[in-house]
Amino acid sequence: EQETLFALLLARLSDNSEAVRLQAAHYLSLTRDPRSESRVDAVRRQSERQRLKRAPIRGVAELWVSGPFDDRGAGFQTVHPPETRAVDVAGRFAVGKKTIRWEKLKPIRMFDFHRKYGDTDGASCYAYLRLISPRRQQVLLTPGSDDGLKVWVNGRRVHENDIARGGLPLQDVVFAELEPGSNEVLFRVRNVVGEHCLYLHYRSLGGSVQATLPEPLDAGGLAARLKEAAKGGKQKVGAAFLDVDWTTEATRGDKARGKKLFAASGIGCAKCHAAKGLAAVPGAPSLTGAGKRFTVQYLVESVLLPNRRISPVFRSTVIVTSKGKVVTGLVVGETGQAVTVLTPEAKRVEISKGEIEERKTQNVSAMPAGLVKTPRELRDLLAYLLAQ
């Protein structure tokens, strides 16, 4: 009897009605049967994509750009430094006798590389931004370019269109999977001859995805911030963490020890954050593929100074109930009836909206400070994360 019901639900995944397909997918997901999981995911992804096509479109007000890089007559077959590592907007690239830096660029109808750099015939330019997502979801990127275009999200190539064309808005359709938290998006636009530009718009469900630009942070800048924090205040950093070359230390770390530290039985990172092979609480920022997404400086600052840079979607929330109970943490789920909060102890607490007397977002991170106690722990943790 159960197999008959399973077969009926499986057949409904191909129904002409989207509502029927989604309802069947819901009931099949409750069974957690491996025979249907891939088809359930496919139905949900396709439904999400159809809704994304109808979602409001947003432009991008500014990008980090670098270039031009000579393609040496080989187009996309020539690989340039920006696409080989996590993007570091404080970094520089020595190309022949010149040094190429990352610079901010605002659009004048388009992001115009020809206007900024002059002659870019036979060369590529790169553009970069960060998309902040409150949950794992798809985003629809709709770039246009003159000429060919490549797109990476979190170090994974999601689009390539090697073409000679005039640039127009909304030329390409690129669906990409976002992780909860920060998502690194890199574009490469190669030029054949003449005009050289990028148009960029995107769609997200409920306008939940925000485009931002990270500020440059090199080793010197990180050291200065840590020394400032060591003087005292709410984010005090111990003296042992100062005057450390964290880029070098990360290469000396023990990845196996770092994995144990990251685990729920260690300092507890895995109670909230996902990493390769380690699941986490839905809605908390993901660290999957951290080595391709984040620089050493970014990770060190995030661990030691969690309140230094906080995305609005990951600020801590304080809820006071009608019975006087106070719950503090990260809101990881919300319906018309209830709010789900992830506490600093990594516990999920569901609160009925009818019981909420006061709700306030704080300008602090839901992640507690001081989890890492020694430089060795941080070194091992970095080694593990950067190996992702």
Image (cartoon, helix red, strand yellow):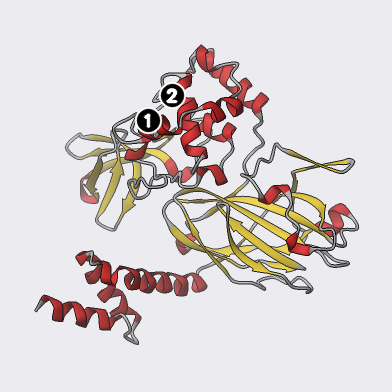
User: Residue sitting at 28 percent across and 32 percent down?
Assistant: 265
Q: Horizontal and vertical percent for residue 374?
A: 44, 18
Q: How crowded is mark 2: few (under 14 residues within 10 Å), some or many (20 or more)?
A: some
Q: Quadrant of residue 112?
A: bottom right
Residue 126 visible (yes or no): yes
Q: How crowded is mark 1: few (under 14 residues within 10 Å), some or many (20 or more)?
A: many
- Residue 377's disc is 2
Q: Given contact means CB atoms under 8 Å apart, are the residues at marks 2 and 1 in contact?
A: yes
| Residue extending furthest toward the bottom | 16
- The Cα–Cα distance between marks 2 and 1, rounded to whole angstroms, is 8 Å
Q: Horizontal and vertical percent for residue 81?
A: 72, 47
Residue 109 visible (yes or no): no
User: Residue sitting at 20 percent across and 34 percent down?
Assistant: 324
Q: What element carries label 1?
A: helix
Residue at the spot of label 1: 261
Of 205 and 6, which appears nearest the observer? 6
User: Residue sitting at 50 percent across and 69 percent down?
Assistant: 55
Check disc 2 and give the amino acid type: Glu
Q: Horizontal and vertical percent for residue 41?
A: 36, 68
Q: Is residue 257 above or below residue 202?
A: above
Q: Is residue 33 above or below residue 99?
A: below
Q: Horizontal and vertical percent for residue 345?
A: 28, 33
- Residue 180's disc is none
Q: In this view, does 9 lie above or below 237?
A: below
| Residue extending furthest toward the left | 1
Counting residues from the start of the chain, the first of labels 2 and 1 encountered is 1
